[in-house]
Amino acid sequence: MSELRKDPIVGRWVIVAPNRAERPQDIVSQPVLQTGLPCPFCEGNEEQTPPEVAACREAGSQRDGPGWRVRVVPNKFPALRPEAVLETRVDGLYETMAGVGRHEVIVESPRHLASVSELSAEQLGEVLEVYRDRLVEARQDRRLVYGLIFKNFGAAAGASLAHLHSQLIATPTVPLHVREELAGAVEFLRREGKCVFCRIVEQELADRSRLVLESPRFVAFAPFASRFPYETWVTPKRHATRYEQTAAEDYRELAHVLRETLCRIERAVPRIAYNYFIHTSPFDTGPFDSGEPAHYHWHIEIIPRLTNVAGFEWGAGYFINPLPPEEAAAILREAEERSPETPKNPTAGSG
Amino acid sequence: MSELRKDPIVGRWVIVAPNRAERPQDIVSQPVLQTGLPCPFCEGNEEQTPPEVAACREAGSQRDGPGWRVRVVPNKFPALRPEAVLETRVDGLYETMAGVGRHEVIVESPRHLASVSELSAEQLGEVLEVYRDRLVEARQDRRLVYGLIFKNFGAAAGASLAHLHSQLIATPTVPLHVREELAGAVEFLRREGKCVFCRIVEQELADRSRLVLESPRFVAFAPFASRFPYETWVTPKRHATRYEQTAAEDYRELAHVLRETLCRIERAVPRIAYNYFIHTSPFDTGPFDSGEPAHYHWHIEIIPRLTNVAGFEWGAGYFINPLPPEEAAAILREAEERSPETPKNPTAGSG
């Protein structure tokens, strides 16, 4: 029998309907990504992208030449551009703003890898530090108020190139979904005197039925009102408003947890497509040194793209999830790597 | 150059980025729907569905036998069920509600047709009256507060069967997207003293750049902050809160406008997939005879499924639309049928 579950942050309802998984078409087939070479993101093909804006490079290597580990370039087809002039126009009811912003591609390996699982935790840790650097850099542009880091992995998740990469889009308005979370979190703080994300982490660590894995400082869990099969959130256990203020030594630990979570999702469903994105605080929540705002708590949302989003979801803003998150988490807890070359569950805490 | 446009009802921003249409992968390929026979929705195969809950039948035909024009059956894999007992459960932070509701399939033709364009306006008019009847019926269940009528057309839009059909899902909570529209509309009414949808219709009829077509009582237009290429809304010109209170003689006129709009979309992009859904007032906005609430205005949203919804959209709640709605509307105005068997633009008003 199905049930409705309410997301405690934004109040979105999800229908958990296990019976619907019997529908043969419920899990969509994965289109195959066209991966014609030469790949513009491979080392040696740097001239095929716009000039780089940042890179982690070997000593002595040249900008826009080989010798990098992570490379950041403007998106060739940008949704928003820094050179646009911020102006708004009102025509009767309607408001338009010039497309000011940043749209960057973070190329996560010089080799033609496709999946995060092919990176070491150390390599992914360096990528996560580049995410921080791009957010800190975007924040310098006073016209912008938010930076969203996201990854499209697999054609069904909207990737247009197979080579391992993420993107940053920095915007002059706070994204709707972040505003919804902020509004829910402020309301929760007012009512309960505590950060709603901290309370979620507390309940998940106590309950453990939706826990995927944990390290001393981070936890990965299937959210109670998961919209998608194998949806998993990764977040710091302790209150932390901004991703980009994570202590330098913690990115490596986060990389372990994120990488292991993604590896388990890929083991559970081979050739799965997914998106992940970082929800962090808007740039304008006070200066870095003014202390932690009490209500917001950064997190990474991983959303596998296995189910069709159809008329009901678009019309209602409801989701129908055929896999209860407790079952998803149990499968992901069991999907630990057994191969000899990787230490067993390197980051899991003792719980 | 791209621009950001704000939806005047819910405040959602859309990035209109025409340059991104150049990306070869921006328009997704349409998966082909498997259409193995026997089709459970075809006349003669009635025993393959659950027993019908309503039908438009020829005199003398038998329930669950042939002789129907429109037939309504419970969904074989229901997301929600009427026989569930409404109860809620709270576990710490989390709230769960039993999956009470209705999930029905409205089979729109006894013949194995796929597209609304294959129905006559008269046939579609009868379907639109069945939509009304299902909403009126669902409203009798006092546990339910909303009924969403929606269509998935084409595999990319989430259809699992090709045979022409729509669905009703009636829920014990008001869907998030409807709540967002209601909140925006109430706020607009408070501020401006008028229904925001009435104001939109006024501006679109005066401006005409986003107009697709109109009849004496209805208008089809590309919304200013369209999320998707060829997104089109159909709505009554005069203030009307509830779809199901439309005057009986007006469903036929609505059918002309809706059918012609869908035909033009299919002519503009052959083999397009789309969803449409009706946004009408929740059941509990007072009894039918208490007069029209002033703020809400029913409408049909048609959303073609040509673009990938990827990490940015899921993470931000922003949309990137490569086709400006003024261009989409111009294309749809030009996509009038020219074939001799149909009168030219039968329902368009003189404007």
Image (tube, coloured by chain):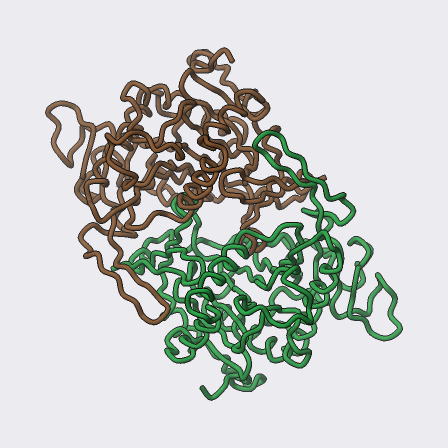
Chain colours: A brown, B green
Residue A131 picture quarter: top left
Q: Position of residue A104 (x, y in %)?
A: 26, 43
Q: State whether residue A38 appears in this view.
A: no
Front-most of B202 and A43? B202
- Is A179 located above or below residue A213 in the figure? below
Horizontal side of residue B56 vs B20, given as left or right? right
Q: Position of residue A38 (x, y in %)?
A: 28, 40
- Is B332 located above or below residue B349 in the figure? above
- Is A35 located above or below residue A249 in the figure? below
Front-most of B257 and B294? B294
- Is B219 located above or below residue B343 in the figure? above
Horizontal side of residue B127 vs A306, given as left or right? right
Residue at coordinates 19% horizontally, 35% vertically from top-left?
A54
Horizontal side of residue A255 vs B262, given as left or right? left
Q: State whether residue A79 appears in this view.
A: yes
Residue A92 picture quarter: bottom left
Residue A330 picture quarter: top right
Horizontal side of residue B222 vs B42, given as left or right? left
Front-most of A289 and A142? A289
Q: How many marks?
A: 0
Q: Position of residue A149 (x, y in %)?
A: 33, 38
* Quadrant of the drawing holding the N terminus of chain A: top right
Q: Position of residue B5 (x, y in %)?
A: 34, 60
